[in-house]
Amino acid sequence: MMNILLSNDDGVHAPGIHALYRALSEIAKVTVIAPDRNCSGASNSLTLHNPLRVHRLENGFYSLNGTPTDCVHLGTNSRLAGEIDLVVSGINDGPNMGDDVLYSGTVAAAMEGRFMGLPSIAVSMGDRGHDYYHTAAKVVAELVQAMEQQPLKLDTILNVNVPYGDYEQIKGTRVTRLGQRHRAGAMVHDKDPFGRDIYWYGPLGPHADDEPGTDFAAIRDGYVSITPLSLDMTANRHQQTLAEWLSA
C-alpha cells in the first residue's frame, strides 16, 4: 500500500486537509503533518532560528509550529511518517494559478517533496468556499490511483486546481500552463487603535494572460487544471541573449 505524506498551508484544522485525508485513507496509508496555524503566502520559507515542536493531536494528525515546507521536510527526514512514496499538499481554500504559485505555501510543500526526490501533488480549489472539498478530494484520489498503477516518470510537481462545484459538473481534465496576472492593487493604508500607520495587502490583480491553454482558462471553462511545475527556474530561452549581451 502506498504511503502518503499529507500537508497544507491552511493549517492542521482546515476542512480541506480533512476532506483529502478521508479520501486518500481509503486507498493508502496517510500521515498528516501540517502547520498549527494558517500559513498562506509562506512560499518556501523555512524555520531556521527557532526549534520545531510537533504535537500529535487526538485524531492522529501531527501539528507543527512551522511552515508548510518545514512540515514536509520533517515528514521526509524523520521517523514520524516512515518511508514516503508520495507527497500531497492541500486542499487549499482558493486557487493557486498563474503567478500565485510563487507565493503559495500549498505549492511550496509539494516542491519540498520534489526536492526530496518524491512525486508530489499540490491541490487547490478553483474558487474560495468550503462546500466542495469532496470534489477535489475525489479528483486527487483518482490521480493517486492512476500514479500507483502507472507511475508518472516526470521530474515535476503536479499543480492541480479543481473547479468549485459538484464532481458531476466537471467537464474533464486539461494539461495547462501557468497564466499571468496584472500587478496587484495598491496597499491599503489604515490606522491602528493607537493612531499608528498600518498596511494591508490590496486585491489581487486581474488576469493578464488567461488564454486557452492556461490554468485560468481551464477553471473558467469547468475543467480540472493540471500544470506540471519544474524546480529548475532557469530561463533557458534567454541564455543565449544574455550571453550575447555580456560579450558585447
Image (spheres, grey):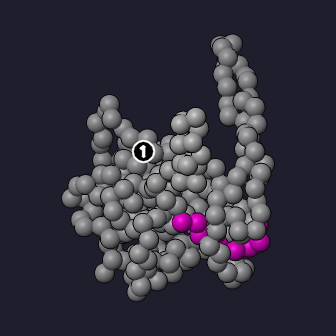
For disc 1, the marked residue is 67
In the rendered image, residue 132, in percent from the top left (x then y), is placed at 64, 69
Q: Secondary structure at mark 1?
A: loop
Which of the two residues, 161 or 98, is positioned nearer the viewer here? Answer: 98
For the C terminus, the quadrant is top right
Whether residue 57 is visible to the viewer of this picture, yes or no, is no
Q: Which corner quadrant of the image does residue 28 belong to?
A: bottom left
Farthest residue toward the front? 248
In the rendered image, residue 109, in percent from the top left (x then y), is placed at 44, 54
Image side of residue 47 versus residue 134, left or right: left
Whether residue 82 is visible to the viewer of this picture, yes or no, is yes
Q: Specify the amino acid type for callout 1.
A: Thr
Image side of residue 26 versus residue 99, left or right: left
Image side of residue 221 versus residue 107, left or right: right
Residue 157 is a magenta residue: no
Farthest residue toward the left? 79
Q: Which residues are magenta?
A: 219-228
In the rendered image, residue 161, in percent from the top left (x then y), is placed at 62, 65
Residue 220 is a magenta residue: yes
Which of the two residues, 121 or 182, is positioned nearer the viewer here? Answer: 182
Identify whether 46 is placed above or below 173: above
In the rendered image, residue 118, in percent from the top left (x then y), is placed at 35, 65
Residue at horizontal 38 percent and vertical 59 percent from the top: 113
Residue at horizontal 32 percent and vertical 71 percent from the top: 85
Task: Estimate how packed mark 1 is, as few (under 14), some (14 to 19) or many (20 or more) residues with alpha carbons within 10 Å.
Answer: many
For the N terminus, the quadrant is bottom left
Farthest residue toward the top? 195
Which of the two residues, 57 or 62, is positioned nearer the viewer here? Answer: 62
Residue at horizontal 77 percent and vertical 72 percent from the top: 221
